[in-house]
Image: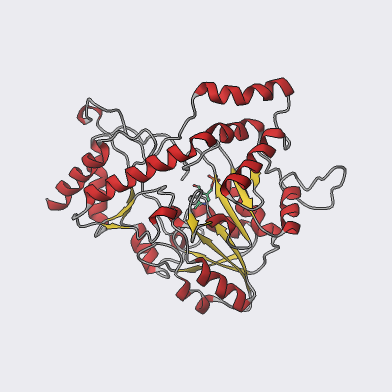
Amino acid sequence: MSSIKPEPVVDADTSSPLRGPVPVTKPFMPPFEEFIEVMRGVWDRGWVTNNGPLVAEFEKALEERFGIQGPVFVANGTLALHLAIRALDLKGEIITTAFTHPVTTISIIWEGCTPVFVDIDPETFNIDPARIEERITPRTSAILATHVYGVPCDVEAIQAIADRHGLKVIYDGAHAFGTTYKGRNILNWGDISTTSFHATKIFQTVEGGSLHTKDPVLLEKLRRMRQMGQWGESFELMGINAKNSEFHAAMGIANLPHYEEIMARRKTQWAHYARVLDGLPVQLIRVDDSDGYNHSYFPVVFRDQLSMMSVREALDAIDIHPRRYFSPATTELPYVQLDGTCPTAENLASRVLCLPMYHELQEGVPDEVAGVIADVLSS
Ligand SMILES: Cc1ncc(COP(=O)(O)O)c(C=O)c1O
């Protein structure tokens, strides 16, 4: 989910005079004065990067406030995945999901491993644990699963499989900040969990990501790896520059007091969409624990690709811009070319649209969207 710019306005003349263009997402911005207040210290200290005090403060706040073990704040969620694979020293095959952002797959290939795709559950859109064991071979070293749209994977089933076969588990929790599973922060599962604080995410630091693990040795290794392996004057470890800056940490710190408000608004918007779409011939994602869900995305699945494209076109025409998250399925990526091997994911990728959701979304937009969907599907 890379772009935070609205898609081009298709026909500005037909958009409602009461609202401007509606992109799929927009970052929540803290009040400017609050951000400047946090930034003042950066100017005073002249310490702008290299694990400064705001990075330490942000990590501590994440740990204490959200009960997330060992956050290692890094430059983005992509590097977090690369560091996770490297730090666990994974080799050979990594079992992964056919329905996620391409970068989950890319991180596996870029780190010299082979992705082995497993199809998804048709209701939660997450990797289907019942299909994992048939893909395990003597070369399998790990399972890398994504909590797609912030809905938790079946973490208990996945852990049981990993334990039976001696595999490591990494969770790509880029969408899942704020989600809990059975009351416990979802980022505490697996050997390592990652998340993203990119501007498109529910809680943002402009660019940013973090890694979480309960293993203190691994935690120390990740901290060293994010700064090129340098530790004092020691260079024993190979690392990469994955540090994040004081400016990015400042955005996180300035956003923290607004966390509850962000989550509450998102939950209300999610419920609003669900209410106005009720009765229409579309499929919504299954969320078992609404209280523990971060409501970060609102995917809608249409009966076929033609309906999805017609709805998208009609919404674009009135300056409302949903996005095809995720299309293609990862099996269909040009550098993978395993089309046809995960039909549930591939079929979903051809029919799904994520509807606009962000803090300042105008209240009437869900009704407008539902009206367009109803019109298009009945014509
Ligand atoms: C599932 C998933 N994983 C990883 C990432 C990468 O995060 P970042 O943009 O912070 O690099 C994204 C980005 O949108 C994502 O959607």
What residue appears at the point 34 percent right and 63 percent down from the top-left corner?
A: 347
Image side of residue 75 versus residue 255, left or right: right
Picture residue at 35% right of the left edge, 60% below the top: 286
Instruction: Indicate the position of residue 75 as horizontal and vertical percent values.
Output: 62, 41
Q: Is residue 379 left or right of residue 159?
A: left
* 240 displayed left or right of 312: right
Image-quadrant location for residue 228: top right
Q: How many marks?
A: 0
Colour convention: secondary structure
Q: Nearer the viewer, residue 311 or 174?
A: 174
In the image, 355: left or right of 255? left
Spot the residue most to the left: 379
Q: Residue furthest right?
A: 233
Q: Position of residue 350 (x, y in %)?
A: 33, 57
Vertical arrangement, residue 231 with respect to residue 328, above or below: above
Which is more toward the observer, 241 or 27?
A: 27
x and y percentages locating residue 115 in the rendered image: 55, 65
Residue drawn where x is 60% and y is 63% of the image:
190
Res 34 → quadrant: top right
- Do we see residue 134 in this rendering? yes
Q: Residue at x 24, y 49 (%)?
A: 275
* Residue 334 appears in the rendering: no
Where residue 71 appears, as percent x and y from the top left, is 64, 48
